[in-house]
Structure formats: structure tokens, C-alpha cells
Image (cartoon, rainbow, N blue to C red):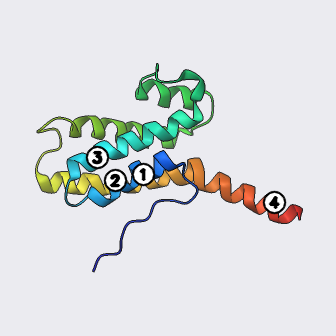
Amino acid sequence: MAKPPEAPQHLPEDVNVLFMEGAIGAKRTPHSACIAFRSCLEAALKRLDPESGGRVSLKDRIDRLVAKHLLPPAIQDWAHHIRDMGNDAAHADGLGTQEDARTLAQELQGFTHHVLLYLFTLPKEIELARQRRAV
């Protein structure tokens, strides 16, 4: 029996829900999973760039956050890949065969997981470690 997917720790609820939607659907509904990972990324990045609200495209938001040094260039590349593949998944033939789509959904799950670790899990773990040291 396959182990159920796990989201990174310390995620905001909306980001967690979208990540799990993608992770659960990665094998059975890979097109939907790719779209969910794109939506998850967008929700996560809006947390870093709240002043722009919904007026900024995901592409521009990614680039803005790199320019503000809130995302490193390596994450920028991954984020654009997740964005592009999520966009492609919205089109009937955008991801190739069903097997291609499954493979891509699993890849995007890994990429999205790592981005979320960087954005939420690591900062919270550092904060908790500092609090433990301060006691």
C-alpha cells in the first residue's frame, strides 16, 4: 500500500489544502494536480507579496519577489516551471500522454514541496529554534 502524501510543515491552511489536492491527485488526475500545484504556488507567493494583491500575474509576482531578494534565482526557475506546466495542464493536449502528465505531476509535487519548505517550513523551524534557545 502506498504511503499517503504529506505536505511540508507550517503551511498556511489555503496553501496546505492546494498542495494536498495536487499530491492526492498526482497519479489519478494528473492534469488537475498540475493546476493545483500552480495554484498552491500562487497562494504561497501572495503571502510574500501581499501588497500587490491580485493585480499581479504569477509570472510578474515571481520576478518581483526575486528582485526584492525574497526568492533566490534557483527558486525562480522552479516557480516558473511550475507556473508554465500548470498553465499547460489547463489545455487538453498541453501535457502529452496521460503517463507524461503523471510523471510531470509527480515532478511538480517535488518542486512545489521544496519551494514550500524554503518559504514556510525552514523559516518557522528557525524561529522555533531561536525561541527554544531564548528560554
Question: Dot 1 corresponds to which residue?
Answer: 17
First in residue order: circle 3 vs circle 4: 3
125 to 52, vertically: above or below? below
SS at circle 1: helix
Amino acid under label 3? Cys
Residue furthest toward the top? 55
Tags 1 and 3 touching, CB below 8 Å: no
Q: Position of residue 17 (x, y in %)?
A: 42, 51
First in residue order: circle 1 vs circle 3: 1
Amino acid under label 2? Glu
Q: Which mark is residue 21?
A: 2
Q: From the viewer's perspective, tell me whether residue 114 is left or right of residue 123.
A: left
Residue furthest toward the bottom? 1
First in residue order: circle 4 vs circle 2: 2
Tags 2 and 3 touching, CB below 8 Å: no
Q: Which mark is residue 131?
A: 4
Residue at point 74%, 60% (across, down): 128
First in residue order: circle 4 vs circle 1: 1
Callout 2: 10 Å neighbours few (<14), some, many (20+)?
Answer: some
First in residue order: circle 2 vs circle 3: 2
Q: From the viewer's perspective, tell me whether residue 85 is left or right of residue 119.
A: left
SS at circle 2: helix
Distance between mark 2 and mark 3 Cα atoms: 10 Å
Foreground: disc 4 or disc 1: 1
Q: Depth check: give the residue in front, 12 or 34.
A: 12
Question: Dot 3 corresponds to which residue?
Answer: 34
Amino acid under label 4? Gln
Q: From the viewer's perspective, tell me whether residue 84 is left or right of residue 69.
A: left
Distance between mark 3 and mark 4 Cα atoms: 37 Å
Residue at point 21%, 47% (across, down): 31
